[in-house]
Every structure is written in C-alpha cells, then in structure tokens.
Amino acid sequence: MNDIPARRRIWGWFFFDWASQPYNTLLITFVFGPYVAQVLGDGTAAQAAWGYGVGAAGVVMALLAPVLGAVADRTGRRRIWIGGFSVLYVAGSAGLWFAAPQDFDLTRTMILFGIGLIGMEFATIFTNAMLPDLAPPETLGRLSGAGWAFGYLGGLVSLVAMLLFFAEDAATGTTLLGIPPLFGLDPDTREGTRLVGPFTAIWYVVFMVPFFLWVGDRSRPTPGGIGAALAGLGRSIRALPETPSRLAFLAASMLYRDGLAGAYALGAIFAAGVLDWSVVETGTFGIIAVMSGALFAWLGGRADQKYGPMPVIVVSVTLLILAVALSMTVSREAIAGIPMGLRSQLPDMIFLGIGATIGGAGGALQAASRTMMIRQADPGRMTEGFGLYALSGKATAFIAPLSVAATTSLTGSQHLGVAPLIVLFASGLLLLRWVNPQGDRAP
C-alpha cells in the first residue's frame, strides 16, 4: 500500500466522510428522526424517545471506544476494524426499512438505529487516527476541514436525492418534486421515506470502495498483545492528570460535542413538533444546514491552518450557544414573546437561519476539534488517543439526549427541553481556558 500516491490516499480518506455522513444527515436528523415523530404523533414523546435511544447507544460507545483504540494500536491493521464496524453500520441502517407505520415497533427501531450508530462511531475512531499519516502536521487542519466539508457534501447529495425521488409528504403522498416515490414504492405505508435506511446502507457500501482501495494502513503492531494494550490504556488514563492540557481538552470537548450531538439529533424533531413541519419541510431545513456545514467546515479548515484550531473552536461554540438560545424563543405563535400571525412565515425563516448556524458552526467545530486532538495526543499512540477522544465524546453522550428527554418529559415543553444543551456548550467553552493549543509537549 506504500506505493499509493499521497493525493489518492488523501482522497480515499475523504471518502469515509462522504460515505458515512448520510447516517447523520438522513437518519439522525432530517428524514428518519422526523418520520418517527410523525408516526408517534406526539413531538414531545418522540423527542424523549429519540433522546433515550441515542443516549443508550452512547453508553455502549463510551465503555468500548478507548479499549478498542488501545487494542488497535497494539495489533495494527486498522482497516480490518473499520471493515468490521462497517458491517454494523450497514446492518443497522438497512433494518430501518421495517419501521412501517402500521406495525411500528419503537424498541426494535431504536435497537437497529443504535447498532448502525455504534458501527459508524467506532469506524470513525480508526479513520480519524489515520489522519496524521496522510500529510505533514502543518497541513492537517486544512485536510481535516476539507474532509468534513466533503462529508457534508455527501450528506447534501444523499439528502437531495431522498427528498426529490423517495421521501413522501404524509399528506400528499408525493416527493419534493410533486411525484410519487420512484420504483412504485407505496406512499400509504411510507415506503418512500422508509427507504432511507437501505439507501443509507447502499450509499455507504458503494462509496467506501475508494477508501479500502486507496488508503493504506500504516499502523504497525507492537509487542505485547491485547493484555499489554489494556494495561497501557490504564496507564494512559491514570496519567491524564500529568498532561493537564490533554485532560482539559478531553473534558471540554466531552461537553461541547455532547451538546452538538444533541442539537443534531433533536433539531429536526424539535422543528417537526414546534413548527409542525413535514418530512419534506425538515428535509429542506436539512439541505440549508448541510450546505452551511460544508462551507464552514472548509472555511474553518483554512482558518485552522492560519490561526490554529483554538480560535475556530471558541467562535463555533459561542455561535452554537446563541443559536440554541434563540430556538427556545421560536414557535408558530410567537418569536421572543412577540405574537405572530397564524400565516406568518417568519418563524420558519428564523428557524432555517438557526439550522444554518448550527450546521456551519458544527462543521467547523468538528473539523477543528479533530486537529486539536492530534496536537494533544501521543504521536506513537494515536488510535488510543482518538479512543480517549471518542470516550470523552461518548462518556457523557447520554447526558445531552437523556437530559433533554428528562427535561422535556418533566416540563411538557419542547422549548424548555433543549435548555441543557446551552449548559453543555457553556461548560465546554469555560474548560477551554486550561487547554494549551500546542499540547502538553509545548513549552
């Protein structure tokens, strides 16, 4: 694999983001999540159920991510691990076809969704750890941003395809083009919308081909096997107080990435319940958010290369706080307490702006955070470092969805239910004060 040209290896690595992004775009946020809300017929109940389901998957990922990262560094062969977790991705997403409205099983649906989500997140650990092998350190910020931007474009193309040709409006039975779903899919049983599961699986299988063909695995096994890997992981965790910058960054990113995941997972369900948007309307919202995410991930990568990742992270988290706070004031009847006419489109326009802000800030934030982790990790144990990064992102991954679910259930309000996201973003922003942008090895 060492004879593969560097540019081709980089593009192969980009294709993982392109292939995997539809799980976030189509399933978590803009098509399948709102579909579940429509089937349940209660936005508050759907927001709570979705929060509990995503939170349960987060617990599994938190427990296993650092262990798998440490084992992978010892055994090498990251591509085999990626292939194994790809099977979970495909099986979980394809199984969502069976979430028919006339025979809807919420427990089965959330289990399948969780299996696919776990596969995606674990595969991401290993692909992130490959980034330092692709190019010189001074270009990694730009590459990380370009990768996220390319992934967002994949999510955008897949979302547009679903909305134009398959996902039907529940009331009219037609897609965004005003036609019935292709291939004779039955709109009465929502087959066009349910195709989003198999569509996501097929998309992943097709576009992972360049990754497996072009990205060589440059990791090398080290002596000691799995037992030594687990012992080394234990030492790394115990030694975190000796690396205060790494510890502070893991804690900060744990909180703000949890808040971002909550905003992504629950944003469209929030809009569907508060503004009574259809799947097609939330899909349009998704197009705008994903376009913004692609643009600002790319711009953020350029800013990262010029100024470093820290300013990009701080600005992005600040924008996310403002966006969530504004969303809490928007409803069909009023904006910030100012009454709106029943036919007013202003609430819809404002929420589209909120979606664009969350998408753009989130894209730049994730790309810059990936670069920051490279600066904080031990160069010889990069997969373990990203395993700890995944742990920090998933150790509390249940907090955002479960706190939103619990707050929504207790208050009976979708608006008040998203308040915990602001607390998570603000706490992460505060902890960044103790992060050295160059890592603990810097003077």
Image (cartoon, rainbow, N blue to C red):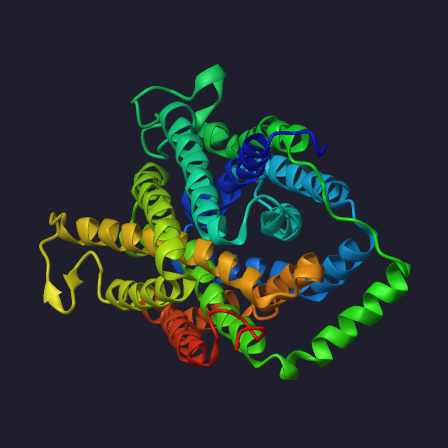
Q: Is residue 35 visible?
A: no
Residue 47 position, x and y percent, is 44, 59
From the viewer's perspective, tell me whether residue 248 is left or right of residue 168: right
Q: Residue at x 69, y 36 (%)?
A: 216
Task: Using the image, determine if residue 59 lies above or below residue 344.
Answer: below
All told, the count of numbered labels is 0
Task: Using the image, determine if residue 193 lies above or below residue 32.
Answer: above
Residue 387 position, x and y percent, is 67, 61
Nearest the viewer among 84 and 27 is 84
Nearest the viewer among 114 and 22 is 22
Residue lying at the far front of the rendered structure: 443
From the viewer's perspective, tell me whether residue 437 is left or right of residue 52: left
Residue lying at the far bottom of the rendered structure: 241
Residue 225 position, x and y percent, is 89, 58
Task: Using the image, determine if residue 307 lies above or below residue 118.
Answer: below
Nearest the viewer among 61 and 192 is 61
Quadrant in which the N terminus is drawn: top right
Residue 155 position, x and y percent, is 44, 37
